[in-house]
Image (tube, rainbow, N blue to C red):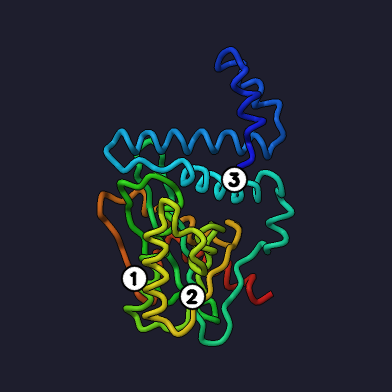
């Protein structure tokens, strides 16, 4: 991560308060590097203490680097990123169905929620689902679980051409390549790609900002509030809670 100079500087601090002050004087990018790396080391230690396999230093650094790359989109590029990516949900074309997925994660409890909503070229809902997650250790796992639930439901309904949209850049890329297979969630990425190859004629995955993923975001919050192992999957429908957002998405997509 090219942080040796930063590490040396922070090691010279006499106490935690002095170190935090030094971090606050860094550039935004270096602040992200320091804080995310510390968080990943802390997470790896907690996992090992809980009986999980001890992660290799290079794996911790690799995951931290991916988190830094994702975070920079929001902290460094700011509003301009959202404008470049678009600020409204866009309809799929032809007979392709668009699947918006989302996951939520609560670090204090290692619980969260997953969801998906599938819509066609007219903006009509073709299916949706949400549910509770437990024993997860990072937000990316929640996003990946949401994607798995979505593609499994889509395949069971006979859908063959899909476009997966997520507000996680890492997940969008992991569904298209093996570059993230050595990360903590690499197994689930490989499982999703294998399932897609076996069950769909075509599949595209892409990133969308949260402004284009509002319906899924609300559903994920509903999933997080469910009881343990509770889930709801609906064919050709979505919960009333998000129908107004769906109607709004449909209206602006025709503008």
Tag nearer the camera, 2 or 3: 3
2 is higher (above) or lower (below) than 183: above
Q: Which image quadrant is residue 7 in?
A: top right
Please tell me how crowded label 1 is: few (under 14), some (14-19), or many (20+) other residues with Cα within 10 Å.
some
Which residue in the rendered view is the most extreme toward the top? 14
> Which badge, 2 or 3, comes first in the chain's sequence?
3
x 64%, y 26%: residue: 23
Question: In the depicted view, which residue is nearer to us: 201 or 215?
Answer: 201
Q: Residues within 10 Å of mark 3 (few under 14, many from 20)?
A: many
Give the secondary structure at mark 1. Answer: strand
Residue 207, position as x, y percentages in the image: 58, 63
Circle on res. 122 = none
Q: Quadrant of the N terminus?
A: top right
In three-dimensional space, the C-alpha distance between marks 2 and 3, rounded to whole angstroms, equals: 32 Å
The residues tagged by marks 1 and 2 sit, at their Cα atoms, a distance apart of 13 Å
Q: Which residue is mark 1?
A: 234
Q: Is residue 128 visible?
A: no
Q: Earlier in the sequence, mark 1 or mark 3?
A: 3
The kind of secondary structure element at disc 2 is strand
Crowdedness near tag 2: few (<14), some (14–19) or many (≥20) residues, C-alpha within 10 Å: many
* Left or right of residue 82, residue 108 in this image: left
The residue tagged 2 is 119
- Mark 3 highlights which residue? 68
Sequence-first tag of 1 and 2: 2
Is residue 1 something that shows in the picture? yes
Residue 8 in picture, x, y percent from top left: 63, 25
Q: List x then y, in percent, for residue 65.
A: 57, 46
């Amino acid at each position: 991560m090219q942080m040796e100079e930063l590490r040396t500087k922070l090691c010279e601090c006499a106490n935690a308060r002095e170190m935090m002050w030094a971090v606050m004087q860094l550039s935004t990018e270096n602040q992200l590097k320091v804080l995310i790396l510390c968080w990943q080391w802390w997470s790896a230690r907690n996992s090992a203490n809980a009986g999980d396999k001890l992660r290799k230093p290079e794996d911790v650094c690799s995951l931290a680097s991916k988190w830094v790359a994702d975070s920079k989109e929001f902290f460094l590029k700011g509003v301009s990123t959202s404008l470049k990516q678009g600020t409204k949900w866009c309809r799929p074309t032809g007979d392709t169905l668009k699947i918006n997925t989302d996951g939520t994660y609560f670090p204090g409890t290692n619980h969260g929620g997953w969801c998906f909503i599938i819509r066609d070229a007219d903006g009509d809902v073709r299916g949706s689902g949400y549910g509770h997650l437990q024993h997860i250790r990072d937000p990316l796992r929640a996003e990946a679980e949401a994607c798995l639930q979505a593609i499994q439901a889509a395949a069971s309904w006979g859908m063959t051409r899909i476009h997966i949209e997520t507000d996680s850049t890492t997940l969008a890329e992991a569904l298209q390549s093996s570059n993230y297979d050595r990360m903590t969630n690499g197994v689930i990425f490989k499982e999703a790609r294998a399932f897609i190859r076996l069950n769909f004629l075509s599949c595209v995955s892409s990133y969308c900002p949260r402004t284009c993923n509002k319906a899924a975001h609300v559903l994920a919050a509903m999933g997080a509030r469910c009881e343990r192992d509770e889930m709801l999957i609906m064919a050709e429908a979505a919960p009333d809670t998000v129908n107004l957002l769906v109607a709004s998405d449909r209206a602006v997509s025709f503008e």
